[in-house]
Structure formats: C-alpha cells, structure tokens
Amino acid sequence: MISMIRIDDRLVHGQVAVKWSKQLNVSRIVVVSDVIAQNEIQTSALKMAAPAGVKVAVLTIAKAIGILNDPRSKDLRILVVTNDPKVVAELLPQLEEKNLFLNMANYGRIGGALSDKEKITETVYLSPEDKQVVQSIFDMGYDFKYQPLPDDTPQSLKQLVGG
C-alpha cells in the first residue's frame, strides 16, 4: 500500500529517511525518476541514506508502476518519493490505488533561477510549467498537503497556489 507520495528535491534525506519513514511506519521507499534510475552513483547514495529496516528502490516510472500495482505491494507500507511533479502526474492515472496522500515540500529551489518561479511557501517554488502540471493533478481530483515534517500543520497546496 502506498502510504504517501512526496515531491522533494532532496529525495531521501533526513526528513524523509527518518521522520516520515517513522511516522508512516514504512518498510520501503521507492524513488521514482527515469534519470536517477540510470545513475549508479546517485542510486547507491540514495540507498545508503535509508534508515535501518527500510529498503530503498530507485526505479523508472514504468518499473515503479509495475511494482506499485503488483498485488504483493498491498502488504507493504511504501513511501514514494520523486523530485518532479511531472512524475506524479504520470503515475497517478496508472496506479490502481486511488485514495492517495500527496505531499510536497522542499521543491523548486534547486535548478533554474528562483526569479523565474513563484514562491508558494518558504520551501516550495513553482515555475509556470510546474504550476500547470500541479493544476493538472488538481484537475484529476487530488490535492497535495504542504507539510515539510510530520509535526507541521498540513496545508492544502491547492489553496496556497490559489487553484
């Protein structure tokens, strides 16, 4: 079962690896990125960042869909992490599981000029293209919670963006 899908530029790091994994009681973290899945060094680093007892898989979108829809995954608690809203927009229509918790935090400050992006929160900056992708996810009937840490009060990203 997918416990959460999170968009975070840093992928597996302290907040995800320790706090969210513990809060969600996950046994697996699935990093979804066609680019990173092809990079052995990044893949190894992400696997090493996992807390004890949590396995990390770095998968392409196609492989992730297959694994996440596999009936054996229903018995697992899985945290899905990506660094690109386009990945989430591609995953959602193809996942059998539909009642999903989407989370976004720490996105948009890496790569590209901040001056070309709209500051949504202290840790979320969206380019015009990002806003279109996020809006398409809203149009599918989903919303993201802006909640950097489990102890933070969740806020609707849809309301923060004004969508």
Image: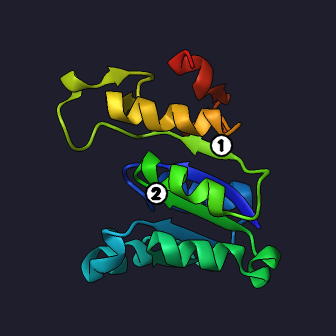
In the picture, measured across the screen, residue 114 lies left or right of residue 104, that is: left
Mark identifier at residue 150: 1
* Residue 96 appearing in the image: yes
Q: Residues within 10 Å of mark 1 (few under 14, many from 20)?
A: some
User: Which is nearer the N-term, disc 2 or disc 1?
Assistant: 2
Choose between 89 and 9: the one closer to the eye: 89
Q: Describe the element under mark 2 as helix, strand or loop.
A: strand
Rounded to the nearest angstrom, the CA distance separating label 2 from label 1 is 18 Å
Q: Quadrant of the C terminus?
A: top right
In the picture, measured across the screen, residue 80 lies left or right of residue 101, that is: left
Q: Residues within 10 Å of mark 2 (few under 14, many from 20)?
A: many
Q: Position of residue 44 (x, y in %)?
A: 35, 81
Residue at image mark 2: 82
Q: Are marks 2 and 1 in contact (CB under 8 Å)?
A: no
In the picture, measured across the screen, residue 147 lies left or right of residue 37, that is: right
Q: Position of residue 39 (x, y in %)?
A: 27, 77
Choose between 6 and 66: the one closer to the eye: 66
